[in-house]
Amino acid sequence: MVPDVSTGDRSRGLLSYLFGPGRRNEHTDPHIVAAFAMPGINDPGRVPLDQHHGALSELADYLDQPVKLREQRLGKKVPQHVWHCPVRTAPGDPYLTDEEWAEVARRIVHSTGIAEHGDDAACRWIAVRHAEDHIHIMATSVREDGRRPRNKGDGRRAQAECRRIETELGLRRLKPGDATAPKTPSGPEVAKAERQGRKNTARVWLREHAYAAAAATRDEDEFFAVLTSLGIKVRPRLGPVTGEVTGYSLATADDTDAKGEPIFYSGSALAPDLSLNRLRERFGLAGGKAAGQATALHTSRTDAGASWRQADGELRAAYSLVTGATEGTAVDKADAKVQAQAAAFAELLHNTAVSAPRQLRAEIQAAAIAFNRANRSAIRADHRAADALRQAGRTLLTSSTGRDGDFVAAALTSAVFLLIALAEWHAQRGHAQQAAAAQQSLVHLRAAQQHAARPALAKLAARALSPQAQDRLAAAVRATIPDHAHRILADPAWPALSTALAQAESAGNPPRRALADLSEQRELDTADRPAEVLVWRLRTATAGQVSQRARSATTRSARNNRLTTETGAPSVPAVQLQPTDVKRLRPGH
């Protein structure tokens, strides 16, 4: 059961909608199921058609009487005096009678402070039913005694009451929230998107693009520049005294009001962590550009493998941190670091959706969008603790695409394990909505990982060893990793792992030593396919050793050829967004 509290200033206009045919003639039999005392007031849904408009005006005047009296006394308009709360059951829920809906309405206005039980001086309200699955509760938020109601936090209180109603009426129980969920699109927003043939509302579309831009940029100037390059209108909010930017709003080119003016949404109206203050916490208050230069990795666009290896290593480090915190249940300083890892992982998913081979992008983008709800909770993040993971995600934007499939598959495998750990952490902390979002994200990320892994595994399996060689390597597995040996050897990826072990042996890394180096990894405890995990760990470790030897040789050569001695450490250039990167940032590109 979903309530959605909002406010407005036109009682008559809202009543016309509630008792009208609907925007698509979807309203059937609109009528009042419950109300504050209404002596002599007709139900507009139960009068002859020729009396309908008169009944609407009469009801609007009745509901507005306390508002008019307050305005006369104070000599000014009462702002946003119309309180509106649709309440909808979930698809498949049992049918509720008018009497049951009436009780739902009375409980909602009581719990929100609009009209508490037994309070004869409460706000005037009505509940209108015009469909099987929902009602609209409307009130004018001035009490009979002329005071405004004490309804602070009414949306949260309505949600809590709906959770209790769901249990008592046998309805589908929705996940409890923690006041960190983004605002859902309103009915008119959804209707407009449908009329325009768009998949998402303007609010949702802007939210997805804002998340993608924030993940790829280092400071607010770059953030606003990327949004502008994507065709999004950006309107900064300036402080009245200092003139500094204190907030921002975004609008699409085709989402306008009745006057043709763009409809802007503030960052916080898109999502709590898209407010300018929250973005600045991630970018760094000392200045994003300086921070970016201090932590950025110098990565050649032709060396995609290095970027993906870096991401893989940081994902595994984050996994160790999160699983360590998951072993406890108390909320402490470690949780602030885990929450930071979740936020940085969300950014990495968005950047991976841009950087991954084209055939993987749709699933990774779907995973990133689903995880947006899981990247924040009521726990305040210590963003400094996840700077390495965040920077690794941004560095992916400089990588080439379509090559280095092994490194992509390895990084996605590590991402899957981190996502599983974050889902478990959210579940242990009672973050039901975040845990559900993480599980939804996991479905898409696993699909992408399997798609990325399939070609390399098939290539390795096609080079299967002789039975005698496989038996020798199987004995090494049993001797080195006895706790996991049965599952490893039964894994369909075992032929591929045996080939990878033989290749490592040829490169000078004996199988038992290679397996011993990998056996301490905690992923093996929960992996569905432990042999596949070892394939990627082994191949990235081998590639890292080869790369390290190459870098060492290059360093020695450069040292020998250096003609002058530098007195200061060289600056490390920051990751720069290229025009092609901005184009790729568009979700769905």
Image (cartoon, rainbow, N blue to C red):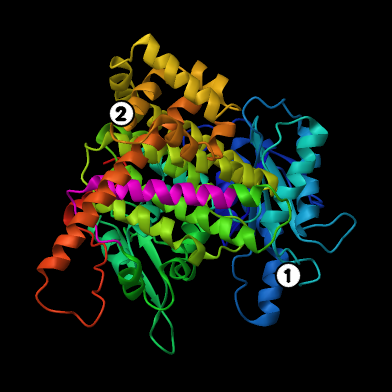
Image point 36% across, 72% down: which residue? 291
Give the numbered dot on residue 37. Answer: none
Where residue 166 appears, as percent x and y from the top left, is: 76, 36
Magenta span: chief secondary structure: helix
**Quarter of the image where one finds residue 400:** top left
Q: Amino acid at mark 1?
A: Arg
Badge nearest the viewer, 1 or 2? 2
Where residue 52 appears, as percent x and y from the top left, is: 61, 42
The answer to whether 423 appears left or right of 36 in the picture is left
Where residue 309 appears, as percent x and y from the top left, is: 34, 46
Task: Let me know if residue 185 appears in the view.
Answer: no
Give yes or no for residue 308 being in the magenta stretch: yes
Q: Which residue is mark 1?
A: 148
Q: Amino acid at mark 2?
A: Gln
The answer to whether 272 appears left or right of 226 in the picture is right
Residue 577 against residue 420 in the figure, above or below? below
Image point 67% across, 41% down: which residue? 175
* Residue range corresponding to the magenta coloring: 297-322
Q: Which residue ends up furthest to the bottom in the rendered image?
A: 241
Binning the other alpha carbons within 10 Å of mark 1 as few (below 14), some (14 to 19) or many (20 upward) gives some
Image point 55% across, 29% down: which residue? 481
Residue 483 against residue 182 in the figure, above or below? above
Residue 18 against residue 230 in the figure, above or below? above
Question: Closer to the N terminus: mark 1 or mark 2?
Answer: 1
Task: Let me know if residue 145 appears in the view.
Answer: yes
Q: Which residue is mark 2?
A: 503
